[in-house]
Image (cartoon, rainbow, N blue to C red):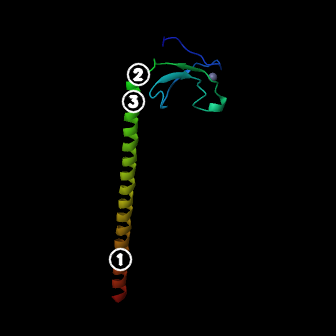
Amino acid sequence: MHNLRKFCYCGEEAVVIQSWSVDNPGCRFYGCPFYERDSRSACNFFMWFDPPNSEHLKMVILGLLKKKRAFDALLNENRNQRNWRRLCVLILIAIVLKLIVLGSSKDCYIM
Ligand SMILES: [Zn+2]
């Protein structure tokens, strides 16, 4: 089944695309190669690559996707907090260096 080349209505060799829709998460299908570059110039060729998933498998995949999104959001939040901490440390270092430079230049005028 998969060793036969598939061609879209444009005459191009169809490509395998993965669906992340709620109804068909993780299912692969053949589609027009122009779809991912510019969907307006693509034809509407569509053919399933994989057999349909069971309802149980759909629920498992959707649950894992939900956990991944929550994890990504937490990771992004931690990254933002870490960037703020780094910025505060850099500002503090700049203030200390400025005070040191001002302090040493003051000493030069006294001498
Ligand atoms: Zn096409």
In the rendered structure, which amino acid carries the disc numbered 1?
Leu
- The disc, 1 or 2, on the residue closer to the chain's N-terminal end is 2
What residue sits 34% from the left and 80% below the top?
103
The mark closer to the camera, 3 or 1, is 3
Q: Position of residue 63 (x, y in %)?
A: 38, 34
| Residue furthest bottom as drawn | 110
Of callouts 3 and 1, the N-terminal one: 3
Name above or below for residue 41 compared with residue 85: above
- Residue, disc 1: 99
Could you tell me how far apart the alpha carbons at marks 3 and 2 are, in whole angstroms?
Answer: 9 Å
Q: Nearer the viewer, residue 62 or 102?
A: 62
Could you tell which of marks 3 and 2 lies nearer the N-terminus?
A: 2
Tell me: is circle 1 under 8 Å from ligand 1: no
108 sits left or right of 1 in the view: left
* Residue sitting at x 37%, y 30%: 60
| Residue at mark 3 | 59
Q: Which residue is mark 2?
A: 54
Instruction: Give the class, few, some or many, for how many residues have Cα within 10 Å of label 1's Cα (few <14, many ≥20).
Output: few
Above or below, comparing residue 90 to residue 107 in the picture:
above
Between the C-alphas of marks 1 and 2, the distance is 68 Å
Residue 10, quarter of the rendered image: top right
Between the C-alphas of marks 3 and 1, the distance is: 60 Å
